[in-house]
Amino acid sequence: MSVRIMPAPVNPVLIKHEAMRDEHLQDRIADAITKFSGSMPFIYIHIVWFALWVGLHVEKFPFGLLTMLVSLEAIFLSTFVLISQNRADERRQLLADSEYAVVQSEEKQNEELLALSRQILDLTTEIHKLTTASKA
């Protein structure tokens, strides 16, 4: 049982973002907890934990302490889900900004190509006029 390892990003913007997150201990901790709590081993641990708690009669029904512990865990896990969503939003924003820069660059290149095409058309028209005038 292991937590699935995500492949490293290939986009330079995401590589830079990952490096930035790796610089801060709290981000690394949050990422590790989020990665583990979203895995099947996390579920299996809880199944065993609940089965042992009930099976070994750690406390009597209605399991007040277990309920409190699970509620506290849910509070923390929901916070880590929000952290994970914020991280995903950062990644999406970085990708969107990067794509926008590429589109702007392509727009400029397209304008330059259109200008060159107009110049070629003008030159071709002039050459055509000259060749037609010289034949006459």
Image (cartoon, rainbow, N blue to C red):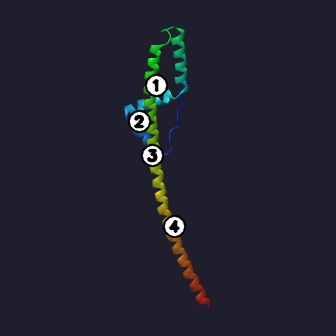
Residue depicted at 52% across the width and 16% down the height? 50
Image quadrant containing the N terminus: top right
The circle drawn on residue 74 is: 1
- Which mark lies nearer to you, 2 or 3? 3
Residue 3 image offset from top left, x and y in percent:
53, 28
Front-lying residue, 8 or 99: 99
Which comes before the other along the chain, label 1 or label 4?
Answer: 1
Asked if the residue at tag 4 contacts the one at tag 2, i.e. Cβ–Cβ closer than 8 Å, the answer is no
For disc 3, the marked residue is: 93
Quarter where residue 72 is shown: top left
Q: Residues within 10 Å of mark 4 (few under 14, many from 20)?
A: few
Residue 89 image offset from top left, x and y in percent:
45, 41
- Which mark lies nearer to you, 3 or 1? 1
Image height of 30 relative to 117, above or below:
above
Residue 14 image offset from top left, x and y in percent:
46, 43
Q: CA distance from mark 3 to mark 4?
A: 30 Å
For disc 4, the marked residue is: 113
Which comes before the other along the chain, label 2 or label 3?
Answer: 2
- Which mark lies nearer to you, 1 or 4? 1
For disc 2, the marked residue is: 22
Q: CA distance from mark 3 to mark 1?
A: 28 Å
